[in-house]
Image (spheres, rainbow, N blue to C red):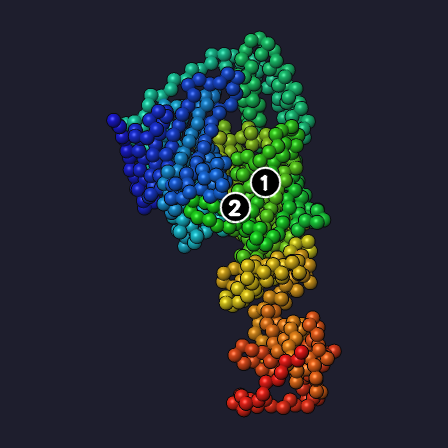
Amino acid sequence: MFKVVKRQVQWGGRTLTLETGKIARQADGAVLATYGETIVLCTVVGAKKAKPDTDFFPLTVNYQEKAFAAGKIPGGFFKREGRPTEKEVLTSRLIDRPIRPLFPDGFFNEVQVVCTLLSHDLENDPDVVALVGASAALTLSGIPFMGPIAGGRVGYINGEYIINPMKSQLAESQLELVVAGTQSSVLMVESEAKELSEEIMLGAVMAGHKAFQPVIDAIISLAEEAAKDAWVLTENPQEQEIKDKLKAAGEAKLREAFAIRGKQERSKRLDAIKDEICKPLVEAQLPAVTVKRLFKQLESDVVRGDMVKTSVRIDGRKPDQVRQIMSEVGVLPKVHGAALFTRGETQALVVATLGTSMDEQRIDALDGEYTESFMLHYNFPPYSVGEVGRMGSPGRREIGHGKLAWRAIHPLMPTKEAFPYTIRIVSEITESNGSSSMATVCGSSLAMMDAGVPLKAPVAGIAMGLIKEGDNFVVLSDIMGDEDHLGDMDFKVAGTENGITALQMDIKINGITEEIMKVALNQAQAGRIHILGEMAKALTGAREGVNENAPRITTISVPKDKIREIIGTGGKVIREICEKTGAKIDIEDDGTVRIAAVNIEQGQAALDWIQSIVQEAEIGKIYSGKVVRIVDFGAFVNFMGSKDGLVHISEMADRRVEKVTDVVNEGDTVKVKVIDIERGKVRLSMKVVDQQTGEDISDKVSPSKPRPPREDRGDRPRREKRA
């Protein structure tokens, strides 16, 4: 019934298995990829005809995790998988980015890649397995795909590169890098690092590229036996004719338009030229979609050719020149920290907010629940590029850019012990003509330092571009939007003066070489140092103490057996503390207590209250307390949290007291001294304390008569209760 074809290869110390022919046989390509006990089903389906009037490649990649893969039932009210998680969105992008450049120009048939996690061993991350499986499925499908590709994860532990480190190993790794590419070149890089040098980062990329070559060989071997017939592509005979007409009518005009320095003015002129040149061709019954697409290609040819020949960019800069930078902090009065970072025509308004552990994000992942105390949210409203657009929940681009900035800053965050705050960063992109994700990195660093977050060092980011024509190439620092759209590479590097913390690379051509990457890394380092210098004009380090609008968090440690007393029955005590002081209190199982309050007095009041609960009474120490109960033989005084002690009638004053109420009443505040503790019961004295000043006056009062031994008191008649 089944014609199963399978290939196995040893990779990173474990076996990778690629199997086809048994599951999802009606898809154009289907591969079951197994690594360890992590299994991903990868399928590919392509539409046999392109949609009319389509001028872009409609590729869709969907990675989805099933809760059953880890033996779980989804949490929440609806017990089924719903909207994609951040992990699913990021993995979908991870697969999309390296495969998209490998489809031929002019191929506009809709293609859908679906990768479904079926089993997860909680040690081998399924993202790389899904990427390899998707590549194999595309190679088998017959859809025009200039692959195969493969990808791998690289760690760096004790000076050595680790291929596909397990989750348990990543905890001690200085690097987590994912690289994807073909047999000859690198297509995509995604990483987070702990201030590593350019040499180490480049070495990691090349180590990963070398390590996945046997995987590509296995995919090719699988395809030789199981691949479907390749699709036949037909060329449009009119394309060359349209190209020639566009070039003759528009090349010179486009060159003049691209000499305009301002983005808005240049865009208006380009739109006018487009209408002027394309309209007659469309009216002559030539396909409108093809005419517009080839006009874009002409724009690209003009810009790219001039840059390679002259090394002069659209806005007149040199290849390694960074646009003018303006950094401002403290721009919003009531927030905890804020920065406005402007680089050329790209601007990010970034705000930092400090909260308590109760504000942490709770995440229910396949490998268990956990909390995240550092969040970075990136927003890209349409007005930032002068357009009208739909506003809604964040898309894949917003989530991906936010995660890149998060990775750049995360290695520099203080420990929870040193800075016990939950931190949320929101980056609002208010202008965009270049890398807004790298502007977010710079603005986030400044905003957190403005809020008083003790970052290990300021961090900055820069986006690099590439124009490659034949064997000639030029690497561009701080690319603009047009250079990104018309170029061959988007290479983003973030870090400190000491090293790289994040690296992301996307390629629009068949790949780049080690030589090009080395040039880009070195040029990016110089640009990053320059940007850090410009940022330092606004702020060189974290401010002393948190912003006055932020909560002050005081951390103390209490004995574990005292936690119950602080919380009280049904949470009664801790609620009372919070309500009466206005502070927020968080208690952990190990006895760590965090008290947060914007007002210093509120925080101190809550701290004093808690300390009074956990402290033990000391003989000879003077306390201030409240009379809570009157009895014939004395008064009970609450002098320390929930602790009460007895002031015997003989200890109330340096004279004979007939009635307790002659001296005190319930609700009175008195000063008392601990004179004895017996079996947990505390005896207090008022007469040895000056009730005005709280001074110990033991040497000025007559000594109390010693209490008779217990056996001598047994025959004494009991005092009758007063009516």
- Residue drawn at (32%, 35%) of the image: 18
- Residue drawn at (38%, 44%) of the image: 71
Residue under label 1, please give it: 378
Instruction: Measuring from the top left, give residue 393's x and y in whole percent.
Output: 58, 35
Spot the residue most to the right.
692
Instruction: Measuring from the top left, give residue 412's x and y in whole percent.
Output: 54, 52
Nearest the viewer among 238 and 109 is 109
- Residue 407 tag number: 2
- Residue drawn at (33%, 39%) of the image: 34
Q: Are marks 1 and 2 in contact (CB under 8 Å)?
A: no
- For label 1, the SS is strand
Nearest the viewer among 243 and 635 is 635
Q: Is residue 339 above or below residue 289?
A: below
- For label 2, the SS is helix
- Residue drawn at (40%, 51%) of the image: 168
Q: Residues within 10 Å of mark 2 (few under 14, many from 20)?
A: many
Residue type at mark 2: give it: Arg
Considering only order in the chain, which callout, 2 or 1, is on the residue closer to the N terminus? 1
In three-dimensional space, the C-alpha distance between marks 1 and 2, rounded to whole angstroms, equals 13 Å
Q: Quadrant of residue 232?
A: top left
Residue 574 appears left or right of 212? right
* Viewport quadrant of the N terminus: top left
Residue 523 appears left or right of 144? right
